Image: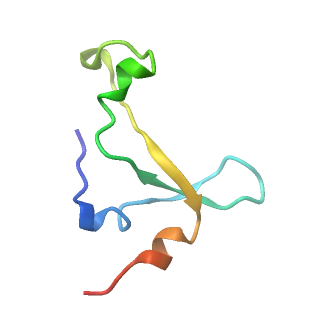
Amino acid sequence: MHQIAGQDLLKEHIPSVKLWKGLALEGIANRDSLPYAEKYGLGPVDGLKDLFRGTLRCATFSSGLKTTS
């Protein structure tokens, strides 16, 4: 399991998600994905190799929300 602390979520985003030409997107992980395996019909959790759920946002979303300490 890969865990990201809440305060690091925007630093650990996926900077480029290429789905459509001309649409710049980034990915941000959503909480614990394992409870959704059954809801999505993926079978038992122990049989899964990987499961990732995330949110797609405009490619500048994370950098626009970063705060300084």
- Looking at this view, name the residue that lies furthest to the front: 39
- Looking at this view, name the residue that lies furthest to the bottom: 69
Residue 38 position within the rendered picture, expressed as x and y whole percent measured from the top left? 36, 18
Number of numbered discs present?
0
**Residue in the image at 45% along x and 46% along y:** 54
Occupied quadrant, residue 4:
bottom left
Task: Name the side, left or right, on which 18 lies relative to 27.
Answer: right
**Residue in the image at 37% along x and 23% along y:** 37
**Residue in the image at 40% along x and 38% along y:** 52
Occupied quadrant, residue 6:
bottom left
- Looking at this view, name the residue that lies furthest to the right: 22
Residue 30 position within the rendered picture, expressed as x and y whole percent measured from the top left? 38, 47
Task: Name the side, left or right, on which 19 lies relative to 34.
Answer: right
Name the image quarter holding the C terminus: bottom left
Task: Name the side, left or right, on which 60 lies relative to 2.
Answer: right
Compared to 8, does 47 lie above or below? above
Compared to 50, does 59 lie above or below? below
Compared to 64, does 44 lie above or below? above
Name the image quarter holding the N terminus: top left
Residue 20 or 58: which is nearer the viewer? 58
Residue 2 or 58: which is nearer the viewer? 58
The colour scheme used to paint the residues is rainbow
Residue 55 position within the rendered picture, expressed as x and y whole percent measured from the top left? 49, 50
**Residue in the image at 33% along x and 62% along y:** 9
